[in-house]
Image (cartoon, helix red, strand yellow):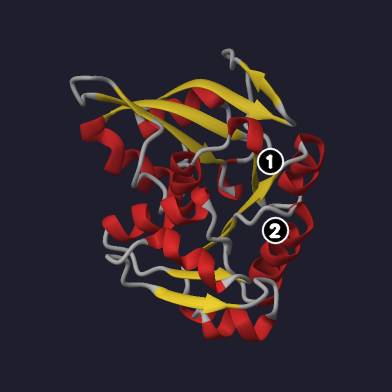
């Protein structure tokens, strides 16, 4: 939802990666930003209207990004996508960092404008592991942001690192960065910043999804 500079860049980036994209905007002239090569659907309407969302294909969508210029519209649309249509991968652009933190705790990934780019939202929309935050110039080492699945809550970070073959560079907890130590335990809502070898990424994400093994 939203076909401004960021929304149009995001839509083209997703399509370049062979994803099917629908774009919603209240102003039909906004779709000109997509360019003539864009093959996705263009739906004119209010992005939090259920009928508009259904016309755009929300029922078969894997992810939803609310990136219009209004905080209220983005939050309403994001909540409708998540709570009404069951979309798990939802990102909302929020100008007010304070409000962004509140909605982050409600389970809606929010990105405040001060640190917002199309690439950041792209990483949060794509399946886990599809697009790392960083690769070293050789392509050997990558840095990924990973929300903690419920199955890992209460597990020591040392065990997580051993089983996933990754290292936790730091974790975000309640809006603050935390450096783990030997006795650290993963908590609900943690966002892990994982360093791993590119060749180990598949194993890491399989292990994260599967959950911890008894040891």
Badge 2 density bin: few <14, some 14–19, many ≥20, Cα 10 Å: many
Q: Indicate whether 183 appears above or below 76.
A: above
Name the foreground residue: 92 vs 128.
92
Asked if the residue at tag 1 contacts the one at tag 2, i.e. Cβ–Cβ closer than 8 Å, the answer is: no
Give the percent coordinates (x, y) of residue 57. Answer: 49, 80
Nearer the observer: mark 2 or 1; the answer is: 2
**Residue 177 lies in what quarter of the image?**
top right
Residue positioned 67% across, 62% down in the render: 78
| Image coords of residue 158 (percent x, y) | 50, 22
Disc 1 is placed on an element classified as loop
- Residue 12, by quadrant, is bottom left
The total number of labels drawn is 2
Residue ID for mark 2: 74
**Vertical comparison of 112 with 61: above or below:** above
For residue 55, which quarter of the picture?
bottom right
What residue lies at 35% left-to-right and 42% top-to-bottom?
A: 131
The residue at the point 35 percent across, 38 percent down is 204
Q: Label 2, label 1: how many angstroms apart (C-alpha)?
A: 25 Å
Identify the residue shown where x is 27% and y is 20%: 136
> In front here: 107 or 3?
3
Q: Quadrant of the N terminus?
A: bottom right
Residue 180 appears at what percent x and percent y?
Answer: 59, 17
User: Quick one: 190 or 54, which is closer to the camera?
Assistant: 54
Q: Answer few, some or many: residues within 10 Å of disc 1's Cα (few below 14, many 20 plus, some between 14 and 19).
A: some
Q: Position of residue 192 (x, y in %)?
A: 54, 31
Residue toward you, 106 or 204: 106
Residue picked out by circle 1: 188
Looking at the image, tell me whether mark 2 or mark 1 is earlier in sequence order.
Answer: 2
Is residue 24 left or right of 49 when viewed as pictured? left
Q: Secondary structure at mark 2?
A: helix
């Amino acid at each position: 939802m939203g076909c401004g500079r960021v929304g149009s860049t995001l839509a083209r980036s997703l399509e370049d990666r062979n994803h099917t994209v629908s774009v919603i905007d209240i102003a039909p002239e906004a779709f000109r930003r997509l360019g003539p090569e864009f093959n996705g659907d263009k739906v004119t309407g209010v992005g939090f209207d259920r009928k508009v969302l259904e016309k755009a294909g929300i029922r078969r969508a894997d992810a939803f990004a609310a990136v219009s210029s209004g905080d209220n519209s983005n939050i309403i649309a994001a909540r409708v996508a998540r709570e009404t249509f069951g979309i798990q991968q939802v990102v909302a652009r929020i100008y007010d960092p304070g409000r962004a933190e509140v909605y982050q705790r409600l389970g809606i990934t929010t990105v405040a404008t001060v640190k917002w780019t199309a690439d950041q939202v792209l990483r949060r929309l794509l399946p886990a592991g599809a697009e790392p935050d960083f690769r070293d110039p050789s392509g050997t080492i990558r840095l990924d942001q990973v929300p903690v699945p419920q199955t890992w809550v209460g597990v020591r970070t040392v065990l997580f690192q051993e089983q996933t073959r990754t290292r936790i560079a730091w974790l975000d907890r309640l809006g603050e960065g935390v450096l783990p130590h030997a006795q650290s335990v993963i908590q609900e809502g943690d966002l892990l910043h994982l360093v791993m070898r590119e060749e180990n990424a598949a194993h890491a994400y399989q292990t994260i999804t599967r959950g911890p093994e008894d040891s």
